[in-house]
């Protein structure tokens, strides 16, 4: 059944030249409203993929920029973070918060290539909710940036960096008027889902989570309840999922079910499998939209404003 929304909530899409065709969604009745802007810098899961047949949707791993007024919030530090760093560095001193879903390599290995982190004027706050009590953010990143895996260590960073370890389920208030509700997700080693609320708008960032077939995850539903945008791990199709149980990822079909149950206004399919080329993502997008009109396939460069 097609699921649409006659809502006055603003969703304004801007497609850059590199974006795929077919990313539009029904928006004629959605009016502008101040709030959150979103830009995708990395949408791929597990592995960065430079192949030309993946170029339209993009091959960089997870990295999503969200702006709340003049505040820059970044969700995950996959390889997409490098291009974001070049942009923000050109605008002067950087002040940003980076929120990690978890610390598997595809979500953190963009950090050493984030140019502003080598500038003394940069101020960064790094947040993670899945490591305590056994580990901490500084330890996890330091382990990645150590011999024989990496040629430089954390002491190469010149930015002022604060490390904020928390427990998934905590409510974060990093800035006045900016609220993040968090919840644990079903992923090997743990992961954290986020619900960002600002100026009457809301976005859920829910990636690297595995569903239980036949049921809807309560944590995911609460994070996504009534949000303007639900970004969800749609790594597999249901046919593929049967061979990938316990890998910690979900399907686009489950994403549609959850978005419908949560009454999310727009669903963005995210964390694309490296084996899903542009043609396959076109097909997935078409099938998903036939079931839920207010759906987009996340692509590098896609920008949404609420």
Image (cartoon, helix red, strand yellow):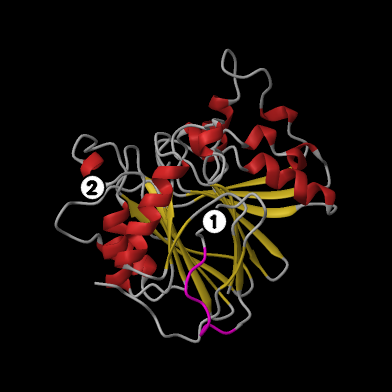
- Front residue of 141 and 56: 56
Task: Give how far across and how far down residue 107 sits, in percent.
Answer: 51, 39
Q: How many marks?
A: 2
Q: Position of residue 183 (x, y in %)?
A: 37, 58
At numbered mark 2, what does the secondary structure look like: helix, strand or loop? helix
Q: Residue at x 69, y 54 (%)?
A: 96
Q: Identify the mark nearer the N-term, 2 or 1.
A: 1
Rate crowding at label 1 as few (under 14), some (14 to 19) or many (20 or more) other CA atoms within 10 Å: few
Dominant secondary structure of the residues highlighted in magenta in the image: loop
Among the 4 quarters of the image, the one containing residue 293? bottom left
User: Mark 1 — residue?
Assistant: 21
Q: Which residues are magenta?
A: 24-31
Q: Is residue 109 above or below residue 193?
A: above
Which residue is depicted at the point 53% across and 46% down? 57
Image spot of residue 1 (x, y percent): 24, 72
Q: Is residue 136 left or right of residue 82?
A: left
Q: Residue drawn 27% across and 57% down?
A: 254
In the picture, measured across the screen, residue 246 lies left or right of residue 12, that is left
- Position of 217 with respect to 135 (left or right) is left
Which quadrant of the view contains residue 239? top left
């Amino acid at each position: 059944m097609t699921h649409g929304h006659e809502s006055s909530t603003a969703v304004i899409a801007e497609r850059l030249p590199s974006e795929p065709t077919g990313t539009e969604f029904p928006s004629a009745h959605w009016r502008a409203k101040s709030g959150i802007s979103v830009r995708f810098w990395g949408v791929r899961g597990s592995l960065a993929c430079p192949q030309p047949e993946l170029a339209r949707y993009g091959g960089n791993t997870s990295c999503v920029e969200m702006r709340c007024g003049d505040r820059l919030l970044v969700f995950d530090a996959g390889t997409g973070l490098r291009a974001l760093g070049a942009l923000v560095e050109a605008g002067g001193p950087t002040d940003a918060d980076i929120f990690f879903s978890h610390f598997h390599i595809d979500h953190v290995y963009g950090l050493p290539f984030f140019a502003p982190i080598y500038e003394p004027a940069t101020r960064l706050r790094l947040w993670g909710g899945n490591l305590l009590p056994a580990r901490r953010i500084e330890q996890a990143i330091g382990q990645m940036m150590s011999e024989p895996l990496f040629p430089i260590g954390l002491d190469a960073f010149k930015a002022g960096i604060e490390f904020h370890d928390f427990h998934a389920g905590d409510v974060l208030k990093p800035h006045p008027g900016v609220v993040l509700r968090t919840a644990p997700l079903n992923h090997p080693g743990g992961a954290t889902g986020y619900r960002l609320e600002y100026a009457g708008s809301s976005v859920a960032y829910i990636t690297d989570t595995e569903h239980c077939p036949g049921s809807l995850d309560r944590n995911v539903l609460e994070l996504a309840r009534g949000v303007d945008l639900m970004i969800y791990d749609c790594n597999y199709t249901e046919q593929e999922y049967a061979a990938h149980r316990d890998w910690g990822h979900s399907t686009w079909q489950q994403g549609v079910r959850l978005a419908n149950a949560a009454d999310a206004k727009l669903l963005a399919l995210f964390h694309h499998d490296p084996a899903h080329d542009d043609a396959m993502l076109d097909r997935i997008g078409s099938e998903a939209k036939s079931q839920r009109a207010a759906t987009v396939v996340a692509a590098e460069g896609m920008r949404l404003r609420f």
